[in-house]
Image: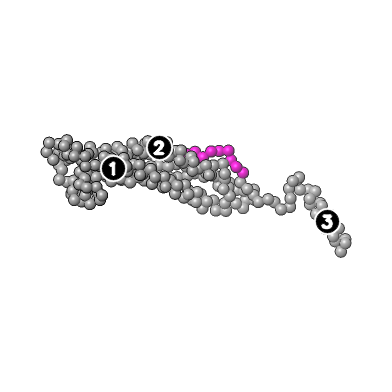
Amino acid sequence: MADDRLRMIRIMALILSVLPAGESLARESPVCPPTDKIVTVEVRFDQAQPFVDDSQSRSWIQGRARALHHPIGLTVSRLAHTLTAQFETGSTADHQRQCVTLRSVSLALGYPSTRIYIANEYRPGSCAYQAIHRHEMEHVRILNHFQEKVLPIWRAHLHTLVQAYERKPLLSTEPHKTQQQVLHELDQAVRKEIQHLDKEQKAAQAAIDTPQNYAKVRASCPQW
């Protein structure tokens, strides 16, 4: 029994003697080394190109306007966004897991289905028709101007969001699932910011939808 112990000690000593300095028998869990590359951010805005619909009645437009009283026209729009991201993956030293690194984020904003409604009682080309069209186009101008104005805010916001993933590869056994999770988290934050900024845009829209402005539009034509 003593000989067996001595033989085992000699075997262990031999193994330890051939291991590089500082390395142990139990290899440490593989980790993803940090990277010095920053995440690139791109934001673009596609301006609204409205479609004019003059086939509906005034009562139909009033029903769509809901809270507005006696609108002379109506502009309907919805801000849409598309968020995409690119990742880089690489195997850990033991080839058991993957290091997932966020490389770039791109945000596209726009109003793809903007419609201007003018009641069908107004003849195209008439003074009233043109006056209503000018008023509704002012709504479109506000949409486009506001989004152009906040593009720097969007870029700064995205730069802040990606800092949580910048230079910090994520260790994963399911890299595709990890990428989708990161994209989902970023998209949720973008949606919250859209809701916040949308309040400012709607306030600017409401400022021109007043009885006083409607009266000015009507007064611009001798016969309404």
Quadrant of residue 107 within the rendered picture: top left
Where does label 2 land, which residue? 151
Q: Which mark is residue 9?
A: 3
Q: Residue furthest left?
A: 223
Q: Name the dominant secondary structure of the magenta segment.
A: loop
**Viewer can see residue 112:** no
Q: Does 178 appear above or below 156?
A: below
Which quadrant is home to the N terminus? bottom right
Residues shaded magenta = 33-41
Q: Identify residue type, mark 1.
A: Ala
Q: Secondary structure at mark 3?
A: helix
Is 73 on the left or on the right of 20, as rendered? Answer: left
Q: Identify residue type, mark 2.
A: Leu
**Residue 213, position in %: x, y?**
22, 39
Q: 181 or 206: which is nearer to us?
A: 206
Q: Spatial distance from mark 2 to mark 1, Cα to Cα?
A: 22 Å
Q: 97 or 162: which is nearer to us?
A: 162
Q: Identify residue type, mark 3.
A: Ile
**Residue 80, position in %: x, y?**
36, 46
Q: Secondary structure at mark 2?
A: helix
Which quadrant is home to the C terminus? top left
Q: Which of the two discs, 2 and 1, labels the residue nearer the N terminus? A: 2
Q: Residue at x 62, y 53 (%)?
A: 96
Where does label 1 land, which residue? 206
**Residue 127, position in %: x, y?**
15, 37
